[in-house]
Amino acid sequence: MEELIRVENLSFAYETLEDGTIDYVLEDINLQVKKGEFLVVLGHNGSGKSTLAKLINAQFVPNEGNIWVKGINTREEETIWDIKKTCGMVFQNPDNQLVATIVEEDVAFGPENLGIPMPKLREQVDKALETVEMSEYKKHSPALLSGGQKQRIAIAGILAMDPECILLDEPTAMLDPSGRKEIVNTILKLNRDYNKTIVYITHYMEEAVLADRIIVISDKKIVEEGTPREIFGKVERMKELGLDVPQVTELAFLLRQEGYDIPNVLTSEELVEALCRLN
């Protein structure tokens, strides 16, 4: 697969302490993201997950090292809009991204500011709303929508700029289970049907299971990297890092400790199948 994002020897700090030492948030981060990949980023609060996403989105510049997005270095100010067109970002609270009083006007805000002319602007807005299944709400006020619907509108606003990659910073954190399911299904559709590269930050391990690859950030560094089955197979290691694993994975782990021949599982269906084979 073609490389879309490369992070090389990245270190970043928001401030330098009074004694002159640099208080790094991230240190010596190396990462590649392939085009069309679904990458999940895990880590406890304050581990630097959101900072990494903002660095990729060129909101900040590394203190040390480099980030390339589609071959463009994020340090190059003259090409910053090319980076933002390639990597769009969706935040935790959709209200922070909704700027207009009508849904379609809100979705049009980003591409309009990029200078996309009519009728192409109209076409991209309609396509974005159709993709997130919100076309019927295009004349509605965002304030009257549910949390899940608002987040889908925020995603549509990014999609209307036609990015190759979407960075999502805990987009389901403020939603109820129904809203979370809406957003996860939308993200999977974007990745699988539209080949959008997804970099997804979440605290929900059941969502992380859906990824192609997971990285875990702790103590300012990437400390684990692998497929969901590889990462969640390390139950004790994840607990040591202050993180959970999917409930079914932990249940299978506890059953193994009791002597049952249960493999590492990621879903309830896999667990049921493994239990049935015991008889």
Image (cartoon, rainbow, N blue to C red):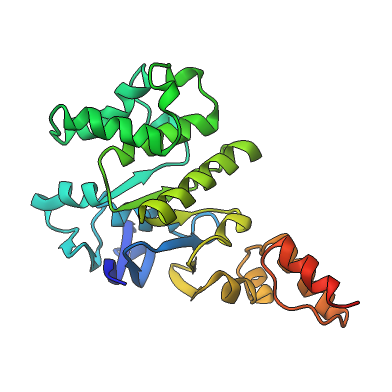
Is residue 16 visible from the viewing direction of this image? no
Residue 91 % position (x, y): 42, 42
212, above or below 86, in the image: below
Q: Is residue 195 visible?
A: yes
Residue drawn at (81%, 79%), measured in percent from left and top?
256
Q: In this view, does 68 lie to the left or right of 174?
A: left
Q: Which of 14 and 131 is in front in this view?
A: 131
Q: Would you place residue 56 above or below residue 110 in this image?
A: below
Nearer the observer, 92 or 149: 149
Q: Nearer the viewer, residue 238 or 272?
A: 272
Q: Which residue is drawn at 63% across and 64% down?
A: 242
Residue 8 placed where, x, y %?
27, 73
Q: Which image quadrant: the N terminus?
A: bottom left
Q: Which residue is drawn at 38% across and 32% down?
A: 129
- 44 relative position to 234: left or right: left
When asked about the image quadrant of residue 96, the answer is top left
Horizontally, residue 43 falls left or right of residue 86, namely: right
Give residue 116's quadrant in the image. Answer: top left
Q: Which residue lies furthest to the right in this view?
A: 279
Quarter of the picture holding the C terminus: bottom right
Answer with the quarter of the image where residue 123 lies. top left
Q: Residue at x 38, y 65 (%)?
A: 26
Measured as percent of width and height from the top left, residue 49 is found at: 44, 57
The picture places residue 167, in percent across and down from the top left corner, at 37, 51
